[in-house]
Image: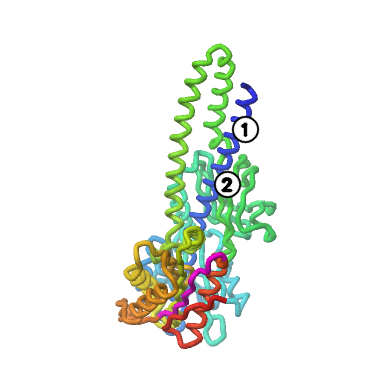
Amino acid sequence: MWAILNAWLKHESELVEQAARNDAMNLAIAFEEHVRSVVRYADALIQDVREELVKDPDAFQMIAKTKLPRYETLVGQLALIDADGWLVGSSLDSLARKVDLSDREHFRVHRDNLGQDQLFVSKPILGRVSEIWSIQLTRPVIKDGEFSGVVVLSIPVAFFTDFYKQINIGSHGLIALVGLDRVPRAAASSINLDARLDGMVVPGDRPYFDSTKPDNGFYRGPSAIDQLDRLTAYRRLKEAGLVVIVQLSPAEYLAAFRERSQFLISCAAAISILLLAFASFLYFATQRHLKSTAALKRAHDSLREIISIDLLTGARSRRDFLETLESELGRSLRHDAPLSLVLLDIDFFKQVNDTYGHPIGDVVLKELSSLCSAVLRTHDVFGRLGGEEFGLILPHTDAEGAVLVAEKLRVAVENAVIPTDRGPVRITVSVGVASAIPAVDDSSSLIVRADDALYTAKQTGRNRVCFASSG
């Protein structure tokens, strides 16, 4: 009896530990997508403002007034620093006085690295105009090959911490956004972190600082902030120089299991005398476990829904689209049913962004998603694979049917007139189609053949549908 109990407790302990790892990583994935979306939209705004400043250097205040309303929940301040380090434009200040920012790292990094047009994400600083703690996202302004200043977008630290605080990770859990320079950008926990984060540098022995290690993973050990033992899940965003960290306290996620274990051990001592009481206990313990499992499954399903949708277009995310393709391809092979893959790319989309600005480009992407959704059948799957590239999974559809669907979609896009704040916009798409070859294609080879067909469509004049060869 005791051997069986010990084996069961070990098994339950492993299940609880694995569930905690899954919860931590799922949260890290959701927060990673949130940070990546914030950085992408912020960078698009910075580049849009910079392009207009190059055309009219004196129009900053008007540009800020026009651009900021759609980003008001994200942006704390939009500012312009001139080549000498003086603040010459701010969405928060009419600038009757100038402010010297030549000592700020986010100015010096661009002044001292001329020719490197890279997004810089600063450490948290106390704004001299806003007087709030914020993270600066910046890009240089280059005119006629010369450094002429820096566009600054300030995101309040509270934007991230308030978002993190919406998630219940326990009284000793912690969520943090840390730079690869080892300086925390934002963190949230039920404990007071403000004093502990001020001037803090995370030890360099953490695995997420090791470039030879994977971009995501786990480790168990003392937290750099308060030395409490925690399970840590991390995901690295190398393009922004950041790491998303989710830490759960073993003392908390194992508490119910330990309490249950002690209770089981106590009951086991009495089982020798009261076998019936032990059987009753097992029944009720099992019912509690089933209810807990159902609640955890609902939480996992909700989290999966968050990360399965592209925030801008409403289409399936790249991750979810590729998982669905793998599943549908396996189903088509098992049931000997046809399946086709369609890849499409907006022709000359960069010109749309350059001509009308990134916000109009976002409108175009949303409208394309709506057009595709209107054309497709209920069982077809539509996803955004990145930038201006989209994909369609067509179950139970052979080559001829897939080409008909693709051509119908191409014509619908060509005939569409997209209304925007900058006037009507028209676009076309190039389309590549491939049908799965039974017992030959896996998802990777099917994507390669569809991508080759898309490349052919682009090379032979764009605004056309090309079908992949079977080779």
Q: Amino acid at mark 2?
A: Arg
Q: Residue at horizontal 54%, vertical 58%? A: 124
Residue matched to label 2 = 196
Q: Residue at horizontal 57%, vertical 56%? A: 235
Q: Which mark is residue 10?
A: 1
Q: Is residue 218 magenta?
A: no
Q: Is the residue 93 above or below the residue 167 in the image?
A: below
Q: Position of residue 452 (x, y in %)?
A: 54, 78
The residue segment tinted magenta is 429-439
Q: CA distance from mark 2 to mark 1?
A: 37 Å
Q: Position of residue 220 (x, y in %)?
A: 64, 44
In the figure, is residue 112 to the left or right of 87?
right
Front one among 81 and 389: 389
Instruction: Name the element at disc 2.
Output: helix
Task: Look at the image and tell me in which quarter the C terminus lies.
Answer: bottom right
Task: Look at the image and tell me in which quarter the N terminus lies.
Answer: top right
Dot 2 or dot 1, earlier in sequence: 1
Alpha-carbon neighbours of circle 2 within 10 Å: few (<14), some, or many (≥20)? few
Front one among 179 and 442: 442
